[in-house]
Image: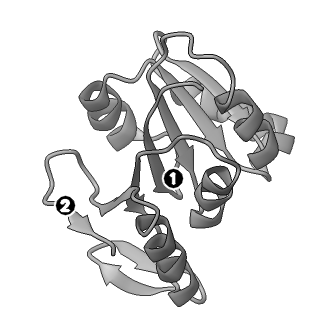
């Protein structure tokens, strides 16, 4: 199994905070983006690839492709998973991908979501999914940046 250091849920995916703060903090050298829609969108794939630092390998998969890839043999990479939605991370966990920590870092205010903490908005369904992930002995934390105070979801 590949070495997943952190799975982050952030509707902005690969952006400044992730590149400047999270990647160096967790010493990631690979980013796996899990997004069913963007996996089929060549334009978005090009945009995402160009947002990454040169020394970071970036892959973009749908959920099934990500699960297959992440269950492959460990090649020494330190992987940051990024997804725009809670459901994708939950699907990976349910497909036995080894995820030890889920970070909720940026989910905007869209229909069906309410403000949960600062600029994090969650629906009641997303909260329940995060709680169910936490019950599987997987850390679920809410924080924008690595040095922010951690708020747990239990």
Q: Is residue 131 left or right of residue 21?
A: right
**Image coordinates for residue 71, horizontal then vertical, percent:** 67, 30
**Image coordinates for residue 91, horizontal then vertical, percent:** 68, 58
Q: Is residue 121 left or right of residue 24?
A: right
Q: Nearer the viewer, residue 81 or 55?
A: 81
Q: Quadrant of residue 67?
A: top right
Residue that appears at 65% across and 31% down: 70
Label 2 secondary element: loop
Question: Which residue is identified by label 1?
Answer: 12
Residue that appears at 71% across and 38% down: 66
Label 1 secondary element: loop
Kindly identify which numbered label has been placed on residue 108: none
Residue that appears at 44% across and 18% down: 29
**Image coordinates for residue 65, horizontal then vertical, percent:** 79, 37
Q: Is residue 153 left or right of residue 96?
A: left
Q: Are marks 1 and 2 in contact (CB under 8 Å)?
A: no
Between circles 1 and 2, the one closer to the viewer is 2
Distance between mark 1 and mark 2 Cα atoms: 20 Å
The image shows residue 138, relative to residue 115, as above or below, that is above
Q: Quadrant of the C terminus?
A: bottom left
**Image coordinates for residue 44, horizontal then vertical, percent:** 72, 40
Question: Which residue is identified by label 2?
Answer: 150
Q: Earlier in the sequence, mark 1 or mark 2?
A: 1
Q: Nearer the viewer, residue 139 or 7?
A: 139
- Around disc 2, counting alpha carbons within 10 Å, would you say few (fewer than 14), some (14 to 19), or many (20 or more)? some
Q: Nearer the viewer, residue 3 or 123?
A: 3
The image shows residue 54, relative to residue 78, as above or below, that is above
Count the marks. Answer: 2
Q: Is residue 32 left or right of residue 17?
A: right
Q: Quadrant of the N terminus?
A: top right
């Amino acid at each position: 199994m590949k070495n997943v250091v952190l799975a982050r849920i952030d509707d902005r995916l690969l952006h400044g905070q992730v590149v400047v703060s999270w990647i160096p903090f967790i010493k990631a050298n690979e980013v796996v983006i899990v997004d069913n829609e963007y996996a089929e969108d060549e334009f978005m794939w090009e945009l995402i690839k160009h947002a990454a630092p040169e020394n970071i390998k970036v892959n973009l998969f749908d959920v099934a492709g990500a699960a297959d890839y992440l269950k492959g043999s460990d090649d020494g990479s330190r992987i940051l998973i990024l997804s725009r939605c809670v459901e994708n991370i939950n699907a990976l966990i349910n497909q036995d991908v080894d995820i030890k920590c889920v970070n909720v870092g940026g989910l905007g205010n869209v229909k069906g979501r309410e403000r949960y903490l600062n600029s994090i908005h969650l629906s009641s369904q997303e909260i329940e999914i995060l709680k169910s992930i936490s019950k599987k002995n997987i850390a679920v934390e809410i924080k924008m940046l690595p040095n922010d105070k951690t708020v747990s979801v239990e």
